[in-house]
Image (cartoon, grey):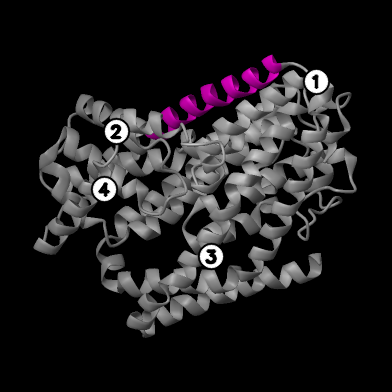
Amino acid sequence: MRDRTRYLYLAVIGAVLLGILVGFVWPDVGKELKPLGTGFVALIQMVIGPIIFCTIVLGIGSVRQAAKVGKVGGLALGYFIVMSTVALLIGLLVGNVIDPGSGLHLSDAARQAAEAQAAKGGESSTVDFLLGIIPKTLVSSLTEGSVLQALLVALLAGFAIQAMGAKGEPILRTIEHFQRLTFRILAMIMWAAPVGAFGAIAAVVGETGLEALKSLAIIMVAFYITCLLFVGVVLGSILWLVARINLWSLLKYLGREFLLILSTSSSETALPRLIAKMEHLGVSKTVAGITVPTGYSFNLDGTAIYLTMATLFIAEATGAPLQFGEQIALLLFMMIASKGAAGVTGAGLATLAGGLQAHRPALVDGVGLIVGIDRFMSEARALTNFAGNSVATVLVAVWTGDFDRERANQVLAGQAPFDESTLLDEDDDTGGPGPDESGDRELSKV
């Protein structure tokens, strides 16, 4: 099966190249293929809630002390805040240095596009976001596609099962079997990846065209370079200093997930696989189950860089540059407003427009300048966010003592390949719990 999955991802690469060709040569046909990509992403999103629920419940239900879960969550959130701030400052620095917005002019079409995005960004507030974490019912948290709702219900269920003691064992075993089922379904869905990638890329290229890419190449290239430097220098250095793991070996291990994100422009499509691969790497179920889903809403490194650089770009392009104090105030607001937007294509653009409308309405029209290339920048945002979350998961595991370093070395060296057919280590006990969980229930070794 592993050999067959290699051909699957070669097919994804071929589908991406074919999609680019179709989008350029027959743009109208490319636009009509968009439902293929949308359908594939929807299939992945269908299983995200159940997988998050199962993973977290098994992780929490398998540890004896509830305080350990709070420690993991506290460390993760603290790290997310620090790294988002670092990303924001890097975006400010680069945006102020390159000054890419000069010389561009707004058209009526661009103004109309900006108004549409501002309307999207203004649809929700911080209060709405917080209240939106609470689902209507326990079951709806697994069916409505909200990562944070599934996370909340899973935490409650995990603590409840933990408090039940031995009586909770049958429930854990049932959830364990359901987890195997959902991962099997995900493995089946992945065989549709080439079709989804073809449709998504063909539609993006068909809608964008070459002219928009040429006229806005500077901001695009600068953004991609900034994201690469952030991942390679900042994240790579921290990962080596704390975990003694080479960043590029970790990114190579997650190569198929990066390809999936690149072809769909959504980091959410790789969320279930990231949880499974982090556990296979030697991260405990508790750390992987809490850090990864939480990071998808709170660890938005790529989005932070995008918001800062895009804001400065628009301010310069519209002839209304921001003072440093104004930059900080506006971008801190948008950082808060962006929580929960990860994995949703175009959410970064809506957040940008909504933030400008709330604080500097005169700049909103400038959003229309980057509407055409936002999908390409969305890919860089998603890839950077994903890299940041994978690094964060390893770091939190190391800090909490839930990281099997020997196992990680074997996996990254290719000696313990990931099972693409099940996405679970069903016959391998070495990739499950961390050191503090090894004496707990056998269920922690799924």
User: In front: mark 4 or mark 1?
Assistant: 1
CA distance separating discs 1 and 2: 40 Å
* Residue 106 visible in the picture: yes
Q: Which residue corresponds to mark 3?
A: 40
Q: Which residue is mark 4?
A: 120
Rendering coords of residue 74 (x, y %): 57, 20
- Which residue is denoted by mark 1 in the rendering? 165
Residue type at the position of mark 2: Ser
The foreground one among 314 and 364 is 364
At label 3, which amino acid type do we have? Phe
Examine the residues drawn in magenta and state their main secondary structure: helix
* Amino acid on which the number 4 mark rests in the picture: Lys
| Residue 80 belongs to magenta span | yes
Q: Mark 3 vs mark 4: which is more N-terminal?
A: 3
- SS for dot 3: helix
Q: CA distance from mark 2 to mark 4?
A: 11 Å
Q: Pinpoint residue 235: horizontal percent, then vertical percent.
A: 56, 36
In the displayed structure, 5 sits above or below 75; it is below
Of callouts 4 and 1, the N-terminal one: 4
Residue at image location 64% in from the left, 23% down from the top: 72
Which mark is drawn over residue 125?
Answer: 2
Q: Quadrant of residue 355?
A: top left
